[in-house]
Image: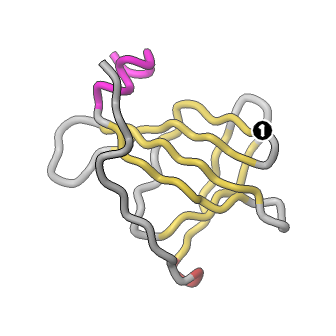
Amino acid sequence: WIEFLYEKHECFDIDRSDWVEWTVSSPTATFRVLSPSFLPRPDVLRAYERDGLLFILGRFLPAGYDEQHGALVIAKREEDGGYRTVVWHELFPHALERLSLES
């Protein structure tokens, strides 16, 4: 089983006034992350930073569903030291199971 991320994508610019800040903690650091306000802020399961990129795997409960879905978030470090979301992709629940992040 593999989740392909190429089927459908939405890409557009978003006015910075519509972004919200949230906090992501990893075993080694805490990060400030900016994301558009309409995107869910997932419960973080894993977060890793390398070379100015923050990789986040999380889960959230989409409206109308009774099962947690995954979220893959990639954010880029900004000049102020915070991170701005560049990629936000919803994952099927089975992806979290295959990654041994959900039972």
Task: Give the residue pinned by disc 1.
Answer: 50
Applied colour scheme = secondary structure
Numbered disc 1: secondary structure: strand
Using residue 43 as the reference point, say whether residue 69 is left or right of it: left
Using residue 31 as the reference point, say whether residue 85 is left or right of it: left
Is 31 a magenta residue? Answer: no
Q: Nearer the viewer, residue 8 or 89?
A: 8
On screen, 27 above or below 12? above
User: Residue at position x 54%, y 83% from top?
Assistant: 15
Q: Quadrant of the C terminus?
A: top left
On screen, 65 above or below 13? above
- Residue 93's quadrant in the figure? top left
User: Residue at position x 75%, y 60% from top?
Assistant: 82
The residues colored magenta run 93-103
Q: Amino acid at mark 1?
A: Arg
Q: Nearer the viewer, residue 27 or 55?
A: 55
